[in-house]
Amino acid sequence: MNRVYNFSAGPSVMPESVLEKVQGEVMNYGDSGMSVMEMSHRSAVYQSIIDGTESSLRDIMGIPDNYKVLFLGGGASTQFAMIPMNLMKKKIDMVHTGVWSKKAMAEAKRFGEVNVVASSEDKGFTYIPELDNNTFSPDADYFHMTTNNTIYGTKFTQIPDTKGVDIVADMSSNILSEVYDVSKFGLIFAGAQKNMGPAGVTVVIIREDLIGKAGDDVPTMMNYKTHAEKGSMFNTPPTFPIYVCGLVFDWIKSLGGVPGIQKINEEKAGMLYDYLDNSKLFSGTVRKQDRSLMNVPFVTGDADIDAQFIKEAGTKSLINIKGHRSVGGMRASIYNAMPVEGVKALVDFMKEFETSR
Ligand SMILES: *Cc1c(COP(=O)(O)O)cnc(C)c1O
């Protein structure tokens, strides 16, 4: 079997043991006589699958009882609109760290005023801007942040003290990669396709008192209350992706939960950053203290050499390491499911490429 090391930013690599489990169950789940894809979402067997997925996620993230977990469609991008539709009355605060905060900002502006408390646009989003408490609005409806910036490879290492203003966090590209205290957030959302499972489901973790705030003009499907009241079963949820996410959550559990996977992630990212810091050819693009554990952009400084490297890496089964078009160079996305051996293989090839020049 010729599996590659897939450094795609998303959809991205899945744990091999999960794929094998899916393969084993794809024709006949348990003794149901059918595939999960073929099941009614109203059946008892499917109810047990979605319940299991939710309880595993609650377990590994330590989600407090006063939070609801929703499994929705529409991707993280739908949340950019759904969040202000439900939670914004007048004004929100936001920190601008790249394309995803920009998109969230554009949607929020349809519903009110957006105050940008800090931005790293001046240096191409290659760092995490300093957050000064004095720039926050005490009367903001919430504060929106992107914990990990997939395209630029930056990450917040601290969750700001907003003095009681609820924090809304886009964790699409680093949920479950390191330990977060869920109780610090009003709402966490993440598309599944980076660190949880197949594309198609978006997880929303929302504190209960934030549900039911939407006005009557908010469409039924865009109202968190609709989905919270029906256990994500108001309409047909993305049944198969939810099932696969459950298997991924159990896989994380088997590795010692989020603390266990965090340790592995630190080891993987450490290997790559150590090499970048010592290389004469390659260098990282992000300020050291703001580096992501999940997305590692790097360049040689010469577009032709970058292109040559990407091409040769492809022949070594190191796939999808071309950087985002707005950054250029290379980006290795090393999500939870990327094995240590994959990062080793990449670093080995980088060394080989460097010495051969
Ligand atoms: C990928 C990504 C998104 C967009 O996700 P979709 O599910 O494609 O809408 C939003 N935010 C971040 C941080 C991402 O990495």
Image (cartoon, helix red, strand yellow):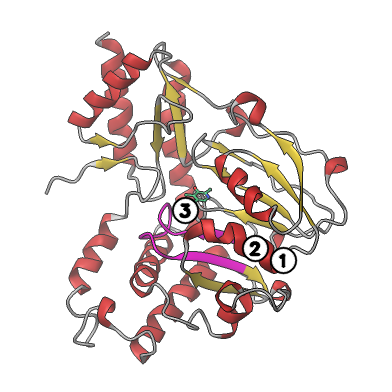
Closest to the camera, between mark 2 and mark 3, is 2
Q: Pointer 2 and pointer 1: residues touching (CB < 8 Å)?
A: yes
- The three-letter amino acid code for the residue at tag 2 is Ile
Picture quadrant of residue 39: bottom left
Outermost top residue:
357
Residue 237 location (% of width, % of height): 42, 76
- Who comes first in sequence, dot 2 or dot 3? 2
- The three-letter amino acid code for the residue at tag 1 is Leu
Residue 30 location (% of width, % of height): 24, 83
Q: Nearer the viewer, residue 92 or 41?
A: 92
Looking at the rendered structure, the secondary structure element under dot 3 is helix
Mark 3–mark 1 Cα distance, whole angstroms, equals: 34 Å
Above or below: residue 160 compared with residue 330:
below
Mark 2–mark 1 Cα distance, whole angstroms, equals: 6 Å
Closest to the camera, between mark 3 and mark 1, is 1
- The three-letter amino acid code for the residue at tag 3 is Gly
Q: Pointer 3 and pointer 1: residues touching (CB < 8 Å)?
A: no
Looking at the rendered structure, the secondary structure element under dot 2 is helix
Q: Which residue is drawn at the image coordinates 59% and 81% (left, top)?
A: 226
Q: Disc 1 marks which residue?
A: 87
Picture quadrant of residue 89: bottom right
Region rendered in magenta: 188-205
**Residue 161 belongs to the span the image colors magenta:** no
